[in-house]
Amino acid sequence: MSVKTSQKPKQVTKKILSPLQDRAFEVVVCRFGLGEKEERETLESIGERYGITRERVRQIENAALQSIRKSDEFKSFESFFEEIKNVIKGLGSVITEDELLEELAKDKSSQNHFLFYLVLSDLFNKEKEDEHFRSRWHVDSDVYSKVHNGLSKFYDSLGDDELIPEAEFVDKFLTHLKDLNQDLKDREVVKRWLNISKKIGQNPLKEYGKADTSGVKVRGVKDYAFLVMRKHGNPMHFREVAKSVADIFGKKAHVATIHNELIKDSRFVLVGRGYYALKEWGYEPGAAREVIKKILKLSGPLSSWYNLCDGSRMKSLMFYTYILKSLRDGKLYIGYTNDLRKRFKQHNEGLSTYTKGRGPWEIIYYEACLNEDDARSRELYLKTGVGRRYINSRLKRFLFHT
């Protein structure tokens, strides 16, 4: 539902344009799509019709807009433009052009008229689209600067493959907007601000992340399969994956096609007869015999592998993703390390910035990986909403009784 304003846009436009001469009038109407044709014409197409250069059309347009701004007809609608400004303030003071026009009017014709007012009045400031941000309008330079800088810093803080549920993502972004007035920190407003960035995106499961990653920019059934398995949190049979893609996303997925993509894509690992897991969960590709051979080659004889008392072999070989539980407030902490014993001791001695003052801690779960990137990816996964559901399922008996 669009915002109600006190004036009808087409009537306002008719009065504002009344001082213009014929050619100037026609150029402005065509450039902004203010007539019967809703499509906005280019400088070239108008120039061809009048037999003049595109630069001459631009000059006529600019002169016409300057003439309108000086006219009494334009000045008589100052309160109407203030009304539009207050609408933008209510939407967060900064908003993409597309979203703003959708809020002001639902039909394309009326949107063209509102865009005309935005261009005319100096109450509104436009920032052009670039490689990082969409075209946007703002009415408060201070708020715009803080949102702009906050988006840039927030993007830099995101992991390459990190996917975060909407509510958690909004909370994380708010930590980068500490200097903003509390009244502006409405969750719907914050989501509009996130949409300003072209580098941040949302997937069909309403998880946010970097827009150019496969977890956000879904290109085909293999990416839908990836999202299905992340949501499920456990290995799945390829037939179950195909069914879930259809059930969750409404996408027709042939079983054979899904199976073929799971085989080809390095994000998936075969872990049983027809069952696949995500590599980011710490699974190693290959037959069990080959994986064991690889472990033994790296770690030495089996007897030293199990010598965990001093941890000397494991410490240099393995990377751990772990979950701690605070005995003070019951909250969980997820991290990763290459020396679990040492790191656990640091947490309990208050040497970690993130857990200081919340101890003592106990280890309630850990996984070991041969590759540091795998352990780090697993940490990021467990911190997502889907990952936390996996934790609740994996440790349900322990968590239920504590």
Image (cartoon, grey):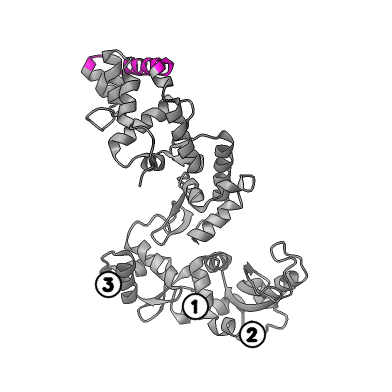
Q: In which quadrant is the C terminus drawn? A: bottom right
Q: Are marks 2 and 3 in contact (CB under 8 Å)?
A: no
What mark, if any, has residue 255 been given in the picture? 3
User: Which residue is at a point 57% across and 83% down the rendered structure image?
Assistant: 400
Residue 133 in percent (x, y) is at 47, 41
Task: Note whether 183 is above or below 279 in the view shown.
Answer: above
Which residue is farthest front?
Answer: 6
Is residue 162 in view from this perspective? no
Task: Note whether 260 is above or below 193 in the view shown.
Answer: below
Q: Classify mark 3: helix, strand or loop.
A: helix
Instruction: Please name the residue that numbered disc 1 is placed on.
Output: 291
Task: Note whether 377 is above or below 176 in the view shown.
Answer: below
Which residue is farthest top?
Answer: 21
What mark, if any, has residue 129 been given in the picture? none
The alpha-carbon separation of the residues under discs 2 and 3 comes to 42 Å
Q: Earlier in the sequence, mark 2 or mark 3?
A: 3
User: Which residue is at a point 48% across and 45% down the rendered structure image?
Assistant: 197
Q: Earlier in the sequence, mark 1 or mark 3?
A: 3
Residue 383 in percent (x, y) is at 55, 66
Q: Is residue 337 left or right of residue 67?
A: right
Is residue 145 in view from this perspective? yes
Q: Earlier in the sequence, mark 2 or mark 1?
A: 1
Crowd rating for badge 3 (residues with CA inside 10 Å; few <14, some 14–19, many 20+): some
Report the amino acid beneath label 2. Answer: Tyr
What mark, if any, has residue 306 been given in the picture? 2
The alpha-carbon separation of the residues under discs 2 and 1 comes to 17 Å
Residue 6 in percent (x, y) is at 38, 34
Report the amino acid beneath label 3. Answer: Val
Magenta segment: 50-72
Crowd rating for badge 2 (residues with CA inside 10 Å; few <14, some 14–19, many 20+): few
